[in-house]
Image: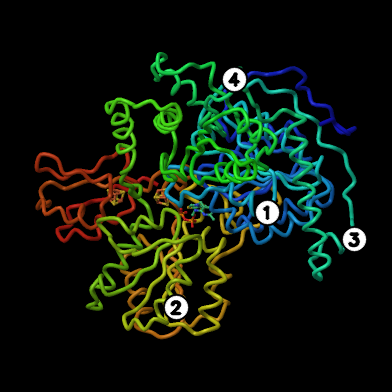
Amino acid sequence: MRPESNSPVSLWRHPLKKLITGNEAVAQGALRAGVKVVSGYPGTPSTGALTSLLVKPDPQRHVEWSTNEKVAIEIAAGAAWAGQRALCTMKMSGVNVAFDSLISVAYSGCEGALVIYVADDPGASAGMCEQDSRSYALMSDLPMFEPVSVADAYELTYQAFALSEAIKGPVFVRLVTAVANSYAEVELQPPDVIPDRDPILDHDIMRYTKAGSTVVMNQHHALIERLKLADLWLREHKVNDLQLANQTGGVGVIINGLIYAYLEEALGQLDEEQFSRDTLSILRLRASHPAPEMEIRQLLKHCSKVVVLEELEPHIERSVYVHAQQMKYQGEIIGKLDGTLSRVGEYGGAQVLRGLAAGLDITLPEKQTRLFDEVEALATDRPITTCAGCPHRGTYMAINRALKNLKLKKREVMVTGDIGCTILGMNPPFNTVWNEVSMGASVSLAQGFVHAGIKTPVIATIGDSTFFHGGMPGLLNAIQHRVNMTLIIMDNRWTAMTGMQVNPGTPLNYQMQNDHSLDLVELVQHMGIEQFAVVDPFDQPQTIEAIEDALQKDGVKVIVARQECAIQATRHQGIKGTMQVNAEKCTKCKVCLMITGCPALCFVDGVMSVDPAICYGCGLCATVCKFDALELEVQR
Ligand SMILES: Cc1ncc(C[n+]2csc(CCOP(=O)(O)OP(=O)(O)O)c2C)c(N)n1
Ligand code: SF4
Ligand code: SF4
């Protein structure tokens, strides 16, 4: 890609070695490509890419956290339609949100560059579905790069911009958690200057609307043609690599993305007397879509067995079967569809080794596989808890107390949950929340439970960012259909779980320059709700009363439980204070610990104490001590 600008020349003229993460590598690749507009919504493991671009704002580049991924992709598409280079970032769940627009944008293509960075999470370390976003590349006929390493993420993001402009269509870059979060030293090239392009105003309704079947079908044809062009471009730029063994009739391995990094390790584990490296052919994919037809066919022609090594869904494997069928291939295809490998979980050396061993007819000693299985098992269970001083603790304590006061059993009252730190109300000691689906789903799920005929109160709980992202349409629906439910919006002013990004309700002094802050309370109370209250979850009597009140009334009731996230509040203002245990008054009943579950409370050797290093001074523990044994030393 060549600079086309007379904008200020960067002082950075020589390659620079830097230790960066995979996320930062995507950001650096985009900077190198002269990206002008960047939008995204936070989500582990993708968040770091956009965050790193916010560190040093450049007046020529617009970078923002958008309200949700659909908004983000529409912003990036608008910029790319106007001829600029745009990047949009999200985690895999975000593609589900963005896809309604993305498929339409894919049909229209773009004039500038549109690169979509998506981070998948095989192994579900971030706690959502093990979604394979390659399915979206297939569904939308968009090319997808799959970098193998941090350095590759840098290189291929840069290439993605070039490919997008070459074919005039959006391009995906997909990382997995292990690449997004790894660190490596990468040689960064001086960035291209941002092209000084006049924005295009293209009034082409045949391209940019879906008005009529002819329009849509023409766009569909064009989309398919762009994918063919992408195939040629990828071959021309040698993105994928086929190494055929000297002899025919051996084993061929097709391997994509990060797991290529495990190939050498796995080969090293095999007994060299049982196979010869010279008979092994390898097709290494750094772009899995479009699957490289020519190379796959060459490999099939050359080998009597083909092993397909890919995490999650057998996408490449299926396309190998299609080509094999068309070529009347007589050999064997080994992967997931024959049951050798699993569609579940992150792949490492173990799975690569299993696949290779099956292809090479080598029986692995049981010890070798068991060791890997044990490592996998170790990685499964991790308890999660809220921080000391978390305001959500106060909300869940108040819900539980209000139910008790109304003589309702917890098991009889449906409390729907949502994404974010708010979901931690599902865990002991609260055990309040029953379910979690997707951003905003708590509000509409609750309505389904009401319509199902539940006679006890139905409560929905949601965080502020999640409410802005996807909860608002659900609330509008509840208001329109006059559903008897209580919505509790836990407004901690930040998008906390993903690392404290701003959202529309974050106070003005933390928003980007020129941005606004929206008052969630103002917004919601004018929506036509039967009952509305704003409470401080650290004020237990006030919060309990508001919840009890709401649960006894009909209609849509909304309570905003507002108190800043303790982590952010500590950063900005320091802790509120430190709780002390008065040993003379403490009866060692442990009620404070059992009700709050606060990690700052410790009961060791028969003595209750508070860890001053993590206590925030929220005061919640003191509200449940009947003996006034907890005394707050105020510090602010
Ligand atoms: C579609 C989608 N996008 C992004 C995420 C990642 N994500 C998980 S929790 C969360 C933040 C929730 O923030 P908020 O609702 O304010 O609750 P808090 O964590 O602050 O309590 C986000 C963005 C996701 N799970 N799904
Ligand atoms: S990060 Fe903030 S909102 Fe999340 S658990 Fe900790 S205190 Fe609560
Ligand atoms: S005041 Fe009590 S509940 Fe609050 S952070 Fe300190 S120990 Fe935990």
Nearest the viewer among 390 and 374 is 374
Q: Secondary structure at mark 1?
A: helix
Q: Nearer the viewer, mark 2 or mark 3?
A: 3
Residue 290 visible in the snapshot? yes
Q: Which percent across, then down, holds residue 163? A: 76, 38
Nearest the viewer among 284 and 327 is 327
Residue 50 visible in the snapshot? no
Query: Looking at the rendering, which quadrant does residue 398 occupy?
Result: bottom left
How would you rate the neighbour count of disc 2 (Cα within 10 Å): few for under 14, some for 14-19, many for 20 or more? many
Q: Are marks 3 and 4 in contact (CB under 8 Å)?
A: no
Q: Nearer the viewer, mark 3 or mark 1?
A: 1
Q: Which percent across, then down, holds residue 420? A: 45, 54
How would you rate the neighbour count of disc 3 (Cα within 10 Å): few for under 14, some for 14-19, many for 20 or more? few
User: Which callout, 2 or 3, points at the residue further toward the start of the chain?
Assistant: 3
Q: Which residue is mark 3?
A: 203
Q: Secondary structure at mark 2?
A: strand
Q: Which residue is mark 4?
A: 245
Looking at the rendered structure, the kind of residue marked 4 is Ala
Q: Are marks 4 and 2 in contact (CB under 8 Å)?
A: no
Q: Nearer the viewer, mark 3 or mark 4?
A: 4
Q: Residue at x 32, y 83 (%)?
A: 455
Looking at the rendered structure, the kind of residue marked 2 is Lys
Q: Which residue is mark 2?
A: 557
Q: Which residue is mark 1?
A: 140
User: Which callout, 3 or 1, points at the residue further toward the start of the chain?
Assistant: 1
Looking at the rendered structure, the kind of residue marked 1 is Ser
User: Which callout, 4 or 2, points at the residue further toward the start of the chain?
Assistant: 4
Looking at the rendered structure, the kind of residue marked 3 is His
Q: Residue at x 31, y 37 (%)?
A: 613
Q: Secondary structure at mark 4?
A: loop
Q: Are marks 2 and 3 in contact (CB under 8 Å)?
A: no
